Image: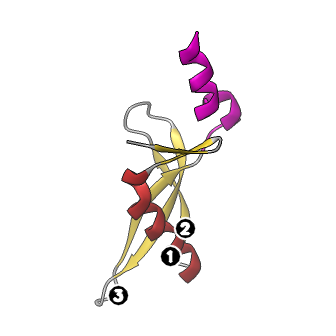
Amino acid sequence: MSKKIGLFKKCPGYQHNFETLKRAFANGDVCLMECKDKATGKEVAVVCGVQRSGDGMIDMVPMAKLFDGNPYEQLLSPMEVDEMEKV
């Protein structure tokens, strides 16, 4: 269950992935890659972690999709959800 902090909600189920992403950015092990969304067929920008193996191979690990368009038009904040639930 998410925990509210002021206007925001923590997402404890994603904390491990978020910490991994932060480490990847700190180490310079990230890239931006264009992929195709399986559900829509549209091209999407994806933040990937770069995972290097001992044999010189590199794996791109998808970590986050970037918004196409204005995210404020696509998302409701926890505060907005609360207001809608009061109605």
Residue 76 in the figure: left or right of residue 33: right
| 3D distance between C-alphas at marks 1 and 3 | 21 Å
Classify 41 as above or below 61.
above
In x, y percent, where is residue 82?
57, 25
In x, y percent, where is residue 63?
45, 58
Q: Are marks 2 and 3 in contact (CB under 8 Å)?
A: no
Q: Amino acid at mark 2?
A: Cys
Q: Amino acid at mark 1?
A: Arg
Task: Give the labeled residue for mark 3.
Answer: 56
Classify 63 as above or below 31.
above
Task: Give the labeled residue for mark 1.
Answer: 23
Q: Which image quarter: residue 80?
A: top right
| 3D distance between C-alphas at marks 2 and 3 | 17 Å
| 3D distance between C-alphas at marks 1 and 2 | 13 Å
Q: Amino acid at mark 3?
A: Gly
Quadrant occupied by the C terminus: top right
Stretch of the chain drawn in magenta? 67-87
Which residue lies at the image location 57% right of the left edge and 25% below the top edge?
Answer: 81
Q: Nearer the viewer, mark 1 or mark 2?
A: 1
Whether residue 46 is in magenta: the answer is no
Classify 35 as above or below 87.
below
Q: Earlier in the sequence, mark 1 or mark 3?
A: 1
Nearest the eye: 64 or 78:
78
Quadrant occupied by the N terminus: top left
Pointer 1: residues within 10 angstroms few (<14), some, or many (20+)?
Answer: some
Which residue lies at the image location 62% right of the left edge and 20% below the top edge?
Answer: 83
Which residue lies at the image location 53% right of the left edge and 17% below the top edge?
Answer: 85
In x, y percent, where is residue 33?
53, 59
Task: Give the labeled residue for mark 2.
Answer: 31
Nearest the eye: 11 or 29:
11
Which residue lies at the image location 49% right of the left edge and 67% below the top edge?
Answer: 21
